[in-house]
């Protein structure tokens, strides 16, 4: 008895060691309050945000007006359950920002603008620069020749040459060339990616993809240049119509820098607060420290399980084959690179032709067939694909292993006619219409879409990105305001978040998950796994035979400590690997003791609300 008691005490000491020491050292719970097994933990991180001006005169910027816009902290939330009035899982993360505002020195500034000249290639103005010249109220005309400048090269140059903490912190660079005598009108380009199915190069061909901002390719830096453009994506070429969609509210956007003048589009006194808004609602909320659309932990496979993308390709166009327009290896490679701590599979089953049940539901969804069905319970035919494929899940998704997690992708190779009222929709990652948990992915393609450059692969990757957690870089959550926002009205300017390296934007300039995606996903996953581990440890600690699993708990401790050390050191991928390993050891221990992992938090089930947004991803700028 005595020996057993001793061992049990050791177990409890070990258990409370896990996650206690480093967390207490970070002062989250302060005052020597140890974390107990079973308690939720919050990983805290101080996040330096460097705000660097290059080309701006010091007297142009009211530092305080900019800083007044910025948040002191950010705690991510799972966004979708909030639309149902539910809190979502506590993500166990808190970031505290440390702002450093600086102006690049004369030497660096001269070197930088020389570099832009050197790598830029003279070109005709974009159609949107010409459209700016055609405005009634424009204060000047863009010249007949402008420079096209490679955006990733500029990001790389800035990350290399600016004297800021680049590795353990984020950097926003505000560029203004217009002040200088060597100024040239310019836009930034990204042309190194073609659509894997169609070979279409959006960055090369489209005027709407010539941008004023970029970042997240090879660095934790994002630059924003109001002396570039004007551009299409944030509609800042339009200085005649404050209200673009005619809904009675101004669509707030930042005009080119020369419009911040008396008689221009914007009062010059608003420049600093405008750049503060961009720093807060774009750089911080949508790029550096974001909130997931769905809970990424829902998609974590169990012990030894795989993460499987199962694509159910439905042939709904006799004139073409969907399987000719998808690369499962592309989808697989990008997901494996993004979440290498999981074993991935990408499998495709071709249904040629589409079966009658799926086809009928698709027709109802598209408004081509007006019939009642399971959608009536949800009040909109937009629910028909979800409810049909959920009721018939076993027909369309084969039985994988119980420990696998399966992303069910339903892909429709169809026609413009069959897309009906949903023509223009590329896809969406639906929820369960009950509590905001992710359910299925739907993807659409047709000859018309392909002629615009779109195959199935990027849509499948983008929507799977949502399903495993990612938000767009143009909509998100502001932590201190408790506000979910998207690119319209007061927040129209947040379209500029799309000008960053990620498959989650609408620009089709990137085919991968970028630096910001990785940072955020790995922080969410690290905190998620450590919380799961600690929760299960609470049950193990309470078990009379806990001494039997000391070995596994000890290993879990070790992995947990390594995870937290890596997290503190901004080695987020390593942190995720270690946190997952800690969790796996705890699961093994729980299995030995016959403890079932607690089912995912039971959410309060409420009636479907019509205020919950259910929208897909449309094609933006189909004409250019
Ligand atoms: Zn999307």
Image (cartoon, helix red, strand yellow):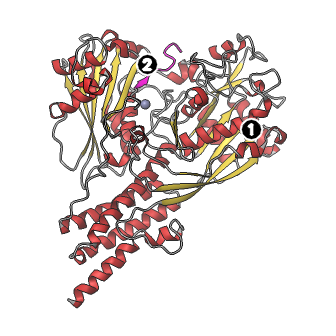
Of residues 91 and 455, which is closer to you in this image?
Answer: 91
How many numbered tags mark residues here? 2
Viewer-side label of 2, 1: 1
Furthest-bottom residue in view? 2
| Distance of label 2 from label 1 (alpha carbons) | 39 Å
Residue at 84 percent across and 40 percent down: it is: 59
Numbered mark located on residue 481 in the image? none
Ligand 1 shows up in the quarter that is top left
Q: Which of marks 2 and 1 is nearer the N terminus?
A: 1
The quadrant holding residue 545 is bottom left
Confirm whether the magenta stretch covers residue 622.
yes
Q: Mark 2 points at which residue?
A: 453
Q: In this view, does 262 lie to the left or right of 194?
A: right
The quadrant holding residue 253 is top right
Say which element carries label 2. Answer: loop
Q: Mark 1 points at which residue?
A: 272
Residue 218 seen anywhere in this rendered image of the structure: no
The answer to whether mark 1 is within 8 Å of ligand 1 is no
Query: Dot 2, crowdedness within 10 Å: few (<14), some or many (≥20)?
Result: some
Q: Name the quadrant of the N terminus.
A: bottom left
Residue at 27 percent across and 74 percent down: it is: 551
The residue stretch that appears in magenta? 616-624
Confirm whether the magenta stretch covers residue 605.
no
Q: Looking at the magenta stretch, what is its main secondary structure? A: loop
Give the percent coordinates (x, y) of residue 334: 39, 39
Residue 411 seen anywhere in this rendered image of the structure: yes
Give the percent coordinates (x, y) of residue 184: 76, 25
Give the percent coordinates (x, y) of residue 213: 62, 33
Give the percent coordinates (x, y) of residue 256: 72, 25
**Relative to 538, residue 242 above or below:** above
Say which element carries label 1. Answer: helix
Residue at 23 percent across and 14 percent down: it is: 371
């Amino acid at each position: 008895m005595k020996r057993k008691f001793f061992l049990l005490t050791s177990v409890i000491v070990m258990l409370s060691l896990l996650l206690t020491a480093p967390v207490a050292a970070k002062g989250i719970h302060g005052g020597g309050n140890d974390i107990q097994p079973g308690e939720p933990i919050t990983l805290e991180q101080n996040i330096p945000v460097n705000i660097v001006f290059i080309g701006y005169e010091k007297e142009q910027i009211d530092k305080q007006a900019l800083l007044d816009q910025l948040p002191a902290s950010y705690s991510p939330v799972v966004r979708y359950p909030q639309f149902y009035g539910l809190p979502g899982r506590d993500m166990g993360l808190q970031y505290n920002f440390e702002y450093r505002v600086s102006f690049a020195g004369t030497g660096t500034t001269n070197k930088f603008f020389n570099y832009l000249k050197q790598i830029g290639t003279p070109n005709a103005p974009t159609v949107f620069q010409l459209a700016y010249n055609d405005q009634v109220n424009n204060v000047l005309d863009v010249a007949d020749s402008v420079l096209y400048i490679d955006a990733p090269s500029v990001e790389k140059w800035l990350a290399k040459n600016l004297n800021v903490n680049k590795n353990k912190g984020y950097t926003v660079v505000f560029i203004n060339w217009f002040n200088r005598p060597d100024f040239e009108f310019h836009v930034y380009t990204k042309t190194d990616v073609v659509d894997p199915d169609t070979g279409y190069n959006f960055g090369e061909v489209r005027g709407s993809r010539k941008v004023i901002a970029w970042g997240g390719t090879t660095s934790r830096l994002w630059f924003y240049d109001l002396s570039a453009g004007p551009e299409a994506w944030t509609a800042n070429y339009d200085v005649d119509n404050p209200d673009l969609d005619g809904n009675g509210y101004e669509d707030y956007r930042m005009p080119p820098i020369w419009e911040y003048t008396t008689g221009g589009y914007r009062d010059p006194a608003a420049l600093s607060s405008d750049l503060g808004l961009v720093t807060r609602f774009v750089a911080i909320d949508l790029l550096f420290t974001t909130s997931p659309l769905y809970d990424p932990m829902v998609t974590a496979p169990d012990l030894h399980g795989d993460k499987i993308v199962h694509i159910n390709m439905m042939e709904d166009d006799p004139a073409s084959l969907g399987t000719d327009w998808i690369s499962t290896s592309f989808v697989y490679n990008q997901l494996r690179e993004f979440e290498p701590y999981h074993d991935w599979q990408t499998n495709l089953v071709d249904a040629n032709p589409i079966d009658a049940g799926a086809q009928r539901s698709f027709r109802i969804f598209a408004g081509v067939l007006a019939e009642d069905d399971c959608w009536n319970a949800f009040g909109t035919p937009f629910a028909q694909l979800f409810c049909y494929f959920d009721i018939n899940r076993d027909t369309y998704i084969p039985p994988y292993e119980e420990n696998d997690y399966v992303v069910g992708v339903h892909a429709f190779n169809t026609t413009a006619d069959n897309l009906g009222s949903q023509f223009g929709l590329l896809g969406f990652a639906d929820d369960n219409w009950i509590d905001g948990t992710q359910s299925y992915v739907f993807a659409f393609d047709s000859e018309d879409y392909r002629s615009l450059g779109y195959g199935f692969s990027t849509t499948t990757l983008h929507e799977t990105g949502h399903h495993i957690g990612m938000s767009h870089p143009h909509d998100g959550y502001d932590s201190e305001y408790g506000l979910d926002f998207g690119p319209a009205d007061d927040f129209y300017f947040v379209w500029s978040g799309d000008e960053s390296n990620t498959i989650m934007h609408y620009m089709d300039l990137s085919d991968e998950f970028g630096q910001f995606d990785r940072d955020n996903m790995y922080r969410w996953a690290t905190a998620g796994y450590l919380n799961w581990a600690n929760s299960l440890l609470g049950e193990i600690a309470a078990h009379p035979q806990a001494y039997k699993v000391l070995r596994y708990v000890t290993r879990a401790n070790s992995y947990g400590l390594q995870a937290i050390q890596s997290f503190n050191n901004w080695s987020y991928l390593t942190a995720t690997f270690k946190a997952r390993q800690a969790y796996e050891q705890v699961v093994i221990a729980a299995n030995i003791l016959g403890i079932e992992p607690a089912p995912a938090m039971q959410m309060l089930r409420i009636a479907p609300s019509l205020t919950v947004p259910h929208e897909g991803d449309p094609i933006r700028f189909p004409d250019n």
